[in-house]
Image (cartoon, helix red, strand yellow):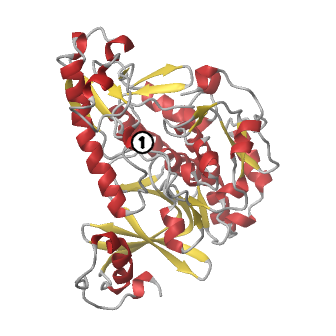
């Protein structure tokens, strides 16, 4: 039974339901909720759902191809964790100092127009002030005539047989249907794929930890030595603090950003489960305060007067659901630096399982098959929810890598819309040709990387 054919029924919990079974109980009663009145319906050629790095890459690429493209985002700004995190570096944007494609460079160009307050480059990273980033992304979208809407959260897929036709989003005026020739799932959590009924994969119980980043200020002359011994001394009084953390300077300002192990020591949380998501988020809010107070109480020197400026919009999520595509990227692919005939992107950096494992890998290619869901037509995925194993996903979640897969997905979506074909039917050779013209070197793969590429 489709979600939009729900029948009326009560929402009262059955008597005697134990809290341990509340998830299952809700799953049983949700299909009985009344259907909400629709606000309106709209139509576009390409719909990109999720305005993080992958969505930005997909939306810009599709628009550059001449497709009418709409990018939607649940928050009030684009950029995903890059914008939410209050100054975390944007990794793998210029690996080894080399531009990796026109879309990556367009973003840099728009940031650089605002000067040194907006962006600096360090090795392969963009160090940004997030308020400039949010506006620079809009500048880039507008340059290629991409339409965009914020504060729209996708809550369902519209399907017809094995073909996705669009998505349902929430608005302040009710639910809205957005129809499209092709939908690109850049939600990070494979939400659209999951809602459509297509197969997704997850390593429940073994997911990478989440992190709530924070900014602190009123610190002068900081070095890593100032944090020595702080977690050990403070843990008894502040039990939620992680085992270690450090401070990094936010681009050209007096604030420091802290990226840390987050929920690693609190348990394993599946963010697609609303109850676990809530628990991880709320514990992380408490952790931020405890970390700040630990530095003030036990840091001494330059840390004793530190002040919290703010924390991320939400916890940063490294891993949840992924699509199951025609090829599943593995740890071995990353370690060995494998190449594929249907290459449409490559991923650089180190294999990073969220503060639990950091190991070397080689630059490795991404096959087009990993962007196409196994069972659903009219749908593509990009970013951290492409088809990969738990470790395979961890080897390519850096933001520059996500933009790269988004770039390819946007091109494929535009070609599919233009020709009336499904993404599965599009010639990979044609996608590769356009990517090459967009400055993407598709011969890369197999290169060993230096330790400077580890973050």
Residue 13 image offset from top left, x and y in percent: 24, 82
Total numbered circles? 1
Which of the pair 192/397 is nearer the observer? 397
Picture residue at 34% right of the left edge, 78% below the top: 25
Q: Is residue 317 above or below residue 127?
A: below
Q: Which residue is mark 1?
A: 264
Q: Is residue 418 above or below residue 392?
A: below
Dividing the picture into quarters, in which one does residue 335 lie? top right
Picture residue at 73% right of the left edge, 35% below the top: 441
Q: In the picture provided, is 374 more to the left or to the right than 212?
A: right
Picture residue at 41% right of the left edge, 36% below the top: 261
Q: Is residue 98 visible?
A: no
Which of the pair 233/28 is nearer the observer? 233
Q: Is residue 295 above or below residue 172?
A: above
Residue 289 image offset from top left, x and y in percent: 21, 35
Picture residue at 32% right of the left edge, 47% below the top: 314
Q: Is residue 144 visible?
A: yes
Residue 414 image offset from top left, x and y in percent: 62, 58
Dividing the picture into quarters, in which one does residue 100 lie? top right
Q: Residues within 10 Å of mark 1 (few under 14, many from 20)?
A: some
Which of the pair 103/154 is nearer the observer? 154
User: What is the secondary structure assignment of the residue under circle 1?
Assistant: helix
Q: In the picture provided, is 370 more to the left or to the right than 454?
A: right
């Amino acid at each position: 039974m489709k979600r939009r054919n729900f029948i009326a029924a009560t929402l009262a919990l059955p008597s005697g339901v134990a809290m341990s079974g509340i998830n299952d109980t809700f799953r049983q009663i949700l299909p009985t909720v009344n259907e909400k009145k629709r606000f309106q319906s709209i139509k576009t050629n390409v719909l990109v759902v999720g305005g993080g790095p992958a969505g930005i890459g997909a939306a810009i690429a599709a628009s550059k191809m001449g497709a009418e493209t709409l990018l939607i985002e649940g928050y009030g700004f684009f950029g995903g964790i890059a914008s939410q995190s209050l100054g975390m570096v944007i990794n793998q944007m210029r690996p080894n100092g080399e531009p990796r494609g026109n879309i990556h460079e367009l973003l840099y160009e728009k940031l650089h127009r605002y000067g040194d307050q907006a962006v600096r480059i360090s090795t392969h990273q963009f160090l940004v002030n997030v308020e400039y980033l949010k506006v620079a992304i809009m500048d880039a979208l507008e340059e290629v005539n991409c339409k965009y809407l914020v504060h729209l959260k996708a809550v369902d897929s519209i399907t017809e047989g094995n073909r996705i036709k669009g998505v349902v989003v929430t608005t302040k005026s009710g639910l809205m249907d957005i129809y499209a020739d092709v939908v690109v799932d850049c939600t990070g959590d494979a939400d659209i794929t999951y809602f459509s009924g297509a197969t997704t994969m997850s390593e429940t119980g073994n997911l990478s930890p989440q992190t709530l980043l924070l900014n602190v200020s009123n610190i002068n002359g900081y070095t890593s030595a100032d944090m020595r011994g702080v977690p050990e001394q403070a843990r008894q009084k502040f039990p939620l603090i992680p085992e270690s953390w450090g401070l990094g300077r936010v681009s050209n300002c007096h604030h420091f950003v802290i990226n840390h192990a987050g929920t690693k020591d609190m348990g394993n949380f599946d963010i697609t489960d609303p109850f676990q998501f809530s628990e991880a988020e709320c514990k992380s809010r408490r952790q931020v305060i405890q970390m700040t107070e630990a530095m003030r109480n036990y840091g001494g020197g330059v840390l004793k007067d530190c002040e919290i400026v703010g924390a991320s919009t939400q916890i940063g999520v490294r891993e949840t659901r992924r699509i199951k595509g025609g090829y599943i990227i593995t740890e071995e692919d990353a370690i060995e630096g494998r190449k594929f005939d249907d290459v449409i992107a490559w991923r650089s950096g180190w294999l990073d399982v969220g503060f639990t494992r950091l190991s070397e890998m080689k630059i490795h290619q991404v096959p087009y098959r990993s962007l196409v869901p196994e069972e659903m037509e009219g749908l593509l995925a990009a970013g951290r929810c492409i088809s990969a194993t738990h470790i395979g996903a961890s080897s390519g979640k850096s933001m520059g890598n996500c933009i790269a897969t988004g770039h390819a997905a946007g091109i494929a979506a535009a070609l599919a819309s233009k020709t009336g074909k499904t993404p599965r039917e599009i010639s990979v050779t044609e996608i590769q040709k356009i990517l090459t013209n967009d400055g993407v070197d598709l011969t890369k793969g197999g290169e060993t990387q230096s330790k400077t590429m580890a973050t």
